[in-house]
Image (cartoon, rainbow, N blue to C red):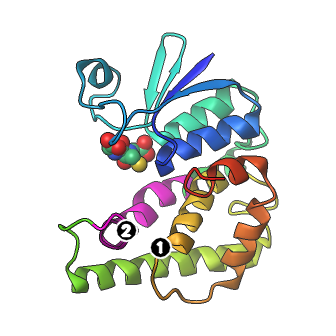
Amino acid sequence: MLRILGKSSSINVRKVLWACTELGLAFEQEDWGSGYADVQSTYFKALNPNAMVPVLLDGDFVLWESNSILRYLANCYGGQALYPLEAQARARVDQWLDWQAADLNRAWGYAFMGLVRQSPYHQDTAQIAASLAAWNGFMRVLEGQLIQTQAYVAGASLSLADVAVGLSVNRWLETPFDRPQLPAVTAYCDRLSDRIGFQRYGRNGLP
Ligand SMILES: N[C@@H](CCC(=O)N[C@@H](CS)C(=O)NCC(=O)O)C(=O)O
């Protein structure tokens, strides 16, 4: 049985939970991370020296880094529909997975910590505004892509990229600020909401 270490309120853990659901995989989830079991413990840091969730245990095999876990699960457990073998189709999925982990994730960091987590260290209004502007800029890039595909991020069918990007879209929609209207992004979120995995894990781990 796969073990997933990480609390379901974590966006990166929810990627893995949703991917397992898409792949029809049974798993055991353990609540690790702030507010739960201690990721600074010797046991946990031997699994992931970064002291972050998620961590996947597949027998003796240990893997951290959420998007790498998505790729591993698809590669190992018949996920060719989510992560195509053909080089260019696979590269398109990788492009959006890497974009989510690097550009999009970096853009929202300050604003999310300040507005949602209410961190006292992230209350500089100019930096919040800069973070929101960068975040919206990347979301406009996503809007353009979804206008082209009229379906999912990497094309006509759901892929691993939608797991990472879909959860990010939920984060953007749930963060309290004056958002620009992005109709293709809104329609995309509605499309994802038909999926049981997104219903279970897409909305901050809540039903
Ligand atoms: N790049 C990592 C980032 C993981 C990450 O930032 N995890 C956060 C939760 S979303 C975490 O472990 N925070 C520390 C904690 O909750 O104790 C990934 O994608 O897996």
Q: Which residue bears the numbered disc 2?
A: 112
On the image, which quarter does residue 6 sit in? top left
Q: Earlier in the sequence, mark 2 or mark 1?
A: 2
Q: Mark 1: is the Cβ under 8 angstroms from ligand 1?
A: no
The x and y percentages for residue 88 are 69, 51
Q: Is residue 130 above or below residue 116?
A: below
Q: How many marks?
A: 2
Graded by Cα atoms within 10 Å as few (under 14), some (14 to 19) or many (20 or more), the crowding at tag 1 reads some
- Indicate yes or no whether the magenta region holds residue 93: no
Q: Amino acid at mark 2?
A: Phe
Kindly identify which residue carries mark 1.
175
Type of the residue with mark 1: Thr
Is residue 41 something one can see in this rendering? yes
Q: Position of residue 100 (x, y in %)?
A: 50, 59
Q: Quadrant of residue 47?
A: top left
Query: In which quadrant is the N terminus drawn?
Result: top right
* Contact (Cβ within 8 Å) of mark 2 with mark 1: yes
